[in-house]
């Protein structure tokens, strides 16, 4: 019995020494880097997008010093857009223009892009959830109506999108605000 215990203690010591010897011979190198992504959209004087750009077409400066561009990708990644329509009483005469602008923007979206439509007056109303379905989005814009109470809770609408609708959404996000004025009531 004593021989078995001594055998296992000896084996344990050999394994322990072997492990320490391996750890001392291997060096661990840790490097921390910070990758900074700068999404860029470039258009010509006529508003047409330019998509065939290369690294040499760009210069990046930090604190007045030019930085080397380590990584460059020319890709279009999908975007998630919230289109907020001001439907307060003050937009009664321009709601048609607001809807038209929203419709024109929706036509520019790519099939992989998603949008949601929100109206706000004295209240925030989600007219469509985040979707790439153009029919649903255009119907939501068409169904936006002028409210019957005074108020333009623009800040509340923006915060609701940021805090609730976009909180768990990954990727690029944008809020398009179509309004005639200032916040009143948030």
Image (tube, helix red, strand yellow):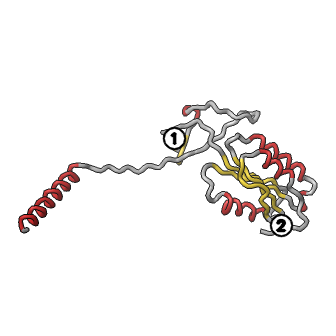
Q: Quadrant of the C terminus?
A: bottom right
Q: Is residue 156 left or right of residue 74?
A: right
Q: Categorize mark 1 by other alpha carbons within 10 Å: few (<14), some (14-19), many (20+).
A: few
Marks 2 and 1, how far apart in space? 48 Å
Q: Categorize mark 2 by other alpha carbons within 10 Å: few (<14), some (14-19), many (20+).
A: many
Which quadrant of the figure has residue 93? bottom right
Checking the image for residue 3, the label placed there is none
Residue sitting at 85 percent across and 67 percent down? 151
Q: Position of residue 82 (x, y in %)?
A: 73, 53
* Extreme-left residue of the structure: 3
* Extreme-right residue of the structure: 93
* Extreme-front residue of the structure: 1
* Extreme-top residue of the structure: 52
Query: Vertical placement of 31 versus 165: above or below?
Result: above
Residue sitting at 13 percent across and 59 percent down? 11
Q: Is residue 83 left or right of residue 50?
A: right
Q: Position of residue 73 (x, y in %)?
A: 55, 37
Q: Position of residue 32 (x, y in %)?
A: 41, 51
Which quadrant of the figure has residue 92? bottom right
Camera-near label (2 vs 1) is 2
Number of callouts: 2
Check if mark 2's residue and mark 1's residue have beta carbons within 8 Å: no
Q: Quadrant of the N terminus?
A: bottom left
Does dot 1 land on a helix, a strand or a loop? Answer: strand
132 vs 77, nearest the viewer:
132
Does dot 2 land on a helix, a strand or a loop? Answer: loop
Q: Position of residue 166 (x, y in %)?
A: 66, 57
Mark closest to the chain's N terminus, 2 or 1: 1
Q: Which residue is mark 2?
A: 122
Q: Which residue is mark 1?
A: 66
């Amino acid at each position: 019995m004593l021989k078995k215990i001594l055998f296992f203690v000896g084996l344990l010591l050999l394994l322990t020494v072997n492990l320490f010897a391996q750890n001392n011979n291997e060096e661990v190198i840790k490097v921390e880097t910070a990758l900074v992504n700068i999404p860029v959209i470039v258009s010509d004087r006529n508003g047409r997008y330019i998509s065939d750009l290369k690294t040499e077409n760009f210069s990046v400066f930090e604190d007045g010093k030019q930085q080397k561009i380590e990584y460059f990708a020319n890709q279009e990644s999908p975007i998630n857009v919230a289109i907020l329509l001001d439907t307060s009483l003050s937009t009664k005469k321009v709601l048609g223009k607001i809807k038209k602008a929203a419709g024109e923007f929706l036509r520019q979206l790519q099939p992989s892009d998603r949008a949601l439509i929100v109206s706000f007056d004295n209240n925030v109303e989600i007219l469509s959830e985040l979707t790439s379905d153009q029919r649903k989005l255009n119907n939501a814009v068409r169904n936006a109506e002028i409210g019957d109470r005074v108020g333009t809770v623009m800040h509340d609408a923006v915060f609701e999108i940021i805090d609730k609708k976009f909180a768990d959404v990954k990727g690029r996000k944008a809020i398009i605000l179509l309004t005639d004025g200032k916040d009143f009531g948030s």
